[in-house]
């Protein structure tokens, strides 16, 4: 018995010695115990561009496969995959932004926001994160309609794993409030994460202007659904100060010229491993877009477009008609897709910036707000500013266009000196479509087209399409939500059937 007691005492002493410094011993000295907020900010910024688990996965599906094709900027004879050109449904393509945004960008931004709230010195990181979350939520609600918003991304923090679907009206109210509060809170005296800021490099004035221009975007989107609120927010946005030049355009900067997550998602889709959609002749510029550029004498044409031979001469460019499949192509005078124009190589450099909103877009929306008497200023001046800025902005993608090129383009497409509001809106929003198309921001072009109806596009009526030959008004929800989140049933009962043709709250 004595021998047993001695052994037991020795064992207990040994175990005590082993656990005495347990926490210290089991901490990896080469890994941080908490991820720095600067790192989380940079990562979250990259994620809103369409990243998420696979470089370019959702930007390819939502921005290119659906939005670019529906807006007739791009076209493809591969209609079984590039379904936006013929308005057909494929679950994983339609749901891509929804399925990748919530577990990636939204979750990361919510985590960053909650961490940044803990210390007042991080007010700028907090404000940037709030603005980034608005950008991401803006895409989600504009693509699908009613979506999880107020409870989204809080699963790990609150245990809410089936977040409710908020009404789009409430989402818009929340986003506008966020932009106002975050823009106001930005401070030049608090800590500024210059290196982690992949948008403006720590320039708080530019962030403020961007928040206000985004505020104007969402205000104008409400124009038909809630005109009084739209007017209030449009005036507030313009009074607070909008983007003042191309230097204020909101774009995410990429440093990587090779494969990886720090590459422009659109570019990665066009030339990346497993993609190669340009070099494989899977996409071409659409006939509608190329013909519009020729008619408008748009100098961007020779920057954005090229034939497979490398020919960039404007007269040589040829757009592929939307809704053309391989069988139809065989009946056309030019029946080889390799002979149609495609994005020029400079358009898919992996370190190209990705634009969220440009100064040109901001000025065009301002011109409309002025015409509606919702803002002060001269609509013609705002329009003129936008056209010249849009021409020069293409230099971000390798162009060398100048003020003189912008002035020449403006002379060919002047603002209507008189006429109806509709005529002026057509001029404003046709150029909006040109700007967003040339910079590959097709989702925004689609959202703006749904509100305004400009430019006037002719839909295709391909056999078996989902819309009876009408351009879709939304994408369908993730099929994986059914039976898992009862909120989707509430959303459908409020918004309407989960179809391409169902109009969301602001789309009247």
Image (tube, rainbow, N blue to C red):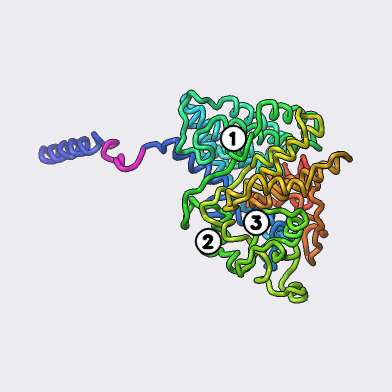
Q: Which of 84/167 is in front? A: 84
Which labelled disc corresponds to residue 131? 1
Q: Work out which quarter of the rendered image holds the C terminus and state it.
A: top right
Instruction: Give the prevailing secondary structure in the magenta stretch.
Output: loop
Residue at the front extreme?
404
242 vs 160, left or right, is: right
SS for callout 3: helix
273 vs 96, left or right, is: left
Residue at the bottom extreme?
330
Magenta-colored span: 22-32
Q: Which residue is mark 3?
A: 64
**Mark 2 crowdedness (10 Å alpha carbons): few <14, some 14-19, many ≥20:** many
Residue at the left extreme?
3
| Image coordinates for residue 363, horizontal then vertical, percent | 70, 37
Q: Work out which quarter of the rendered image holds the N terminus and state it.
A: top left
SS for callout 1: helix
Measured in 3D between alpha carbons, the distance from the residue under mark 2 to the one under mark 1, in whole angstroms, is 30 Å
SS for callout 2: loop
């Amino acid at each position: 018995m004595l021998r047993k007691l001695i052994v037991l005492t020795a064992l207990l002493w040994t175990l005590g010695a082993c656990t005495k410094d347990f926490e210290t011993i089991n901490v990896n000295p080469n890994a941080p115990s908490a991820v720095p907020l600067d790192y989380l900010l940079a990562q979250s910024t990259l994620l809103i561009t369409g990243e998420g688990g696979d470089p370019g996965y959702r930007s390819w599906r939502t921005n290119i496969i659906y939005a670019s094709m529906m807006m007739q900027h791009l076209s493809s004879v591969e209609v079984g995959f590039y379904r936006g050109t013929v308005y057909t449904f494929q679950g994983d393509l339609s749901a891509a932004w929804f399925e990748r945004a919530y577990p990636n960008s939204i979750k990361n931004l919510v985590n960053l926001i909650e961490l940044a709230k803990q210390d007042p010195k991080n007010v700028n990181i907090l404000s940037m994160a709030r603005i980034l979350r608005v950008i991401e939520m803006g895409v989600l609600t504009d693509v699908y309609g009613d979506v999880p918003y107020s409870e989204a991304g809080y699963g790990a923090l609150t245990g809410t794993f089936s977040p409710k679907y908020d009404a789009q009206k409430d989402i818009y109210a929340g986003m506008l409030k966020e932009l106002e509060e975050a823009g106001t809170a930005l401070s030049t005296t608090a800590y500024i994460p210059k290196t982690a800021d992949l948008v403006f490099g720590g320039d708080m004035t530019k962030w403020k202007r961007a928040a206000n221009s985004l505020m104007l975007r969402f205000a104008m989107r409400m124009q038909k659904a809630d005109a009084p609120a739209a007017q209030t927010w449009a005036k507030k946005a313009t009074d607070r100060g909008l983007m003042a030049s191309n230097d204020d355009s909101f774009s995410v900067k990429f440093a990587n010229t090779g494969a990886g997550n720090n590459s422009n998602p659109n570019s990665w889709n066009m030339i990346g491993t497993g993609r190669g959609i340009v070099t494989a002749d899977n996409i071409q510029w659409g006939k509608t877009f190329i013909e519009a550029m020729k008619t408008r004498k748009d100098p961007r044409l020779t920057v954005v477009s090229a034939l497979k031979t490398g020919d960039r001469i404007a007269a040589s460019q040829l757009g592929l008609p939307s809704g053309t499949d391989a069988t139809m192509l065989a009946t056309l005078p030019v029946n080889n897709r390799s002979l149609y124009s495609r994005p020029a190589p400079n358009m898919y450099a992996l370190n190209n910036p990705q634009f969220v909103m440009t100064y040109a877009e901001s000025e065009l929306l301002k011109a409309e707000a002025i015409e509606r008497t919702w803002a002060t200023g001269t609509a013609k001046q705002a329009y003129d500013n936008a056209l010249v800025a849009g021409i020069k902005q293409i230099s971000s993608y390798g162009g060398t266009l100048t003020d003189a090129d912008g002035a020449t383009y403006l002379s060919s497409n002047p603002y209507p000196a008189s006429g109806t509001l509709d005529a002026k809106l057509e001029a404003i929003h046709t150029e909006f479509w040109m700007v967003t198309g040339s910079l590959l921001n097709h989702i925004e072009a689609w959202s703006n087209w749904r509100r305004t109806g400009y430019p006037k596009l002719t839909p295709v009526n391909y056999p078996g399409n989902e819309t009876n030959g009408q351009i879709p008004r939304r994408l369908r929800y993730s099929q994986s939500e059914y039976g898992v989140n009862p909120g989707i049933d509430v959303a459908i009962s409020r918004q309407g059937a989960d179809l391409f043709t169902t109009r969301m709250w602001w789309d009247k």
